[in-house]
Structures are given as C-alpha cells and as structure tokens.
Amino acid sequence: MKTGKIAYIDLNGKWKEYNKYKVTFADGNNYTFFALGDFKFKVGETISYEVTNAEYRNAKILKDQYKNNESTNAIYRDKNDLIIRQTCIKASAHYNSQRNVGTESVINDAELMFNWIKS
C-alpha cells in the first residue's frame, strides 16, 4: 500500500468501458487508474492506493478510501435520491392511472411521497 497527495490528474484514454486516468503525485510518481465515469478524487487530496502492475504503472485505489470521500458520498446520495424519485413517480402514476387527473397532480403526489420517505 502506498499513500500520496494528488498533484495532477489527466484523462488518458479508455479501456473497455473504463476511463484511464494518469495521476501524478506530489513525490513525482505517476500511475494509471481505471474508473467508470469520472475520477472520484481531486487534486490536493491524499489517497492510499495499491500498485497492481509495476511494469505498466497501473494502480487501484483501496476501497476504504471511497467511504471517506465526500464527493463520492454525494454522488451516492444523489443516486439514491434519483432512485427514490423514480419509484415515487411510478407509484404516483399507477395510483393516478384510474383517476382523471393531469400530469401536475401526478407530480405533486410523487413529491409528497418523496418528502414523506426523506423525512
């Protein structure tokens, strides 16, 4: 396990469905990390990682790093909220399908359901 402060992050192509990021650390070392979507850490953050292939300079971030990363937690919160909203709109549409109401009523009912779940 290594630890380093991120000095620079560069998107460096793709491999299958993964984005490749070349991450340079304050000590001058650089490694390639693979990520679905954006790289989850920012310049200036200190991370722990494991070198997975020294020849190709590939590394992976340790799983416990994600639990402490606020931006990642925000993404999961947003994703969970999106799932809850989708479920509420579906339930509201089903509930209102037998009533003769407009879209606005469906959305209002979904919003009530979402607020009740989140409170």
Image (cartoon, rainbow, N blue to C red):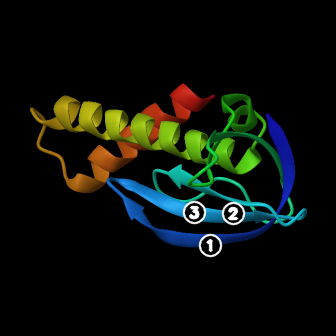
On screen, residue 5 versus residue 24, left or right, reads right
The residue identified by callout 3 is 21
User: Relative to 78, does residue 7 appear above or below in the rendering?
Assistant: below
Label 3 sits on a secondary structure element that is: strand
The CA span between labels 3 and 2 is 6 Å
The quarter holding residue 77 reads top right
Q: Amino acid at mark 1?
A: Asp
Q: Quadrant of the C terminus?
A: top right
Using the image as rendered, state which of residue 58 and residue 13 is in the foreground.
Answer: 58
Q: Are marks 1 and 2 in contact (CB under 8 Å)?
A: yes
**Residue visible at 78% across and 36% down in the picture:** 68
Snapshot quadrant of residue 8: bottom right
Residue appearing at x 69%, y 37% in the figure: 66
Q: Which mark is residue 10?
A: 1
User: Disc 1 and disc 2: Cα gap in Å?
Assistant: 6 Å
- Badge 3: residue crowd in 10 Å (few <14, some 14–19, many ≥20): many
Separation of residues labelled 3 and 1 (CA atoms)? 5 Å
| Label whose residue precedes the other's in the sequence (1 or 2) | 1
At which x and y percent is residue 79?
Answer: 49, 43
User: For mark 2, what is the residue?
Assistant: 23
Proximity of marks 3 and 1: CB atoms separated by less than 8 Å: yes
Q: Is residue 16 left or right of residue 44?
A: left
Please report the residue visible at 46 percent of the width from the left and 51 percent of the height from the top.
Answer: 36
Q: Amino acid at mark 2?
A: Val
SS at mark 1 in the image:
strand
Image x and y of residue 39, in percent: 60, 57
- Asked if residue 54 is positioned above or below residue 42 in the image, the reply reads above
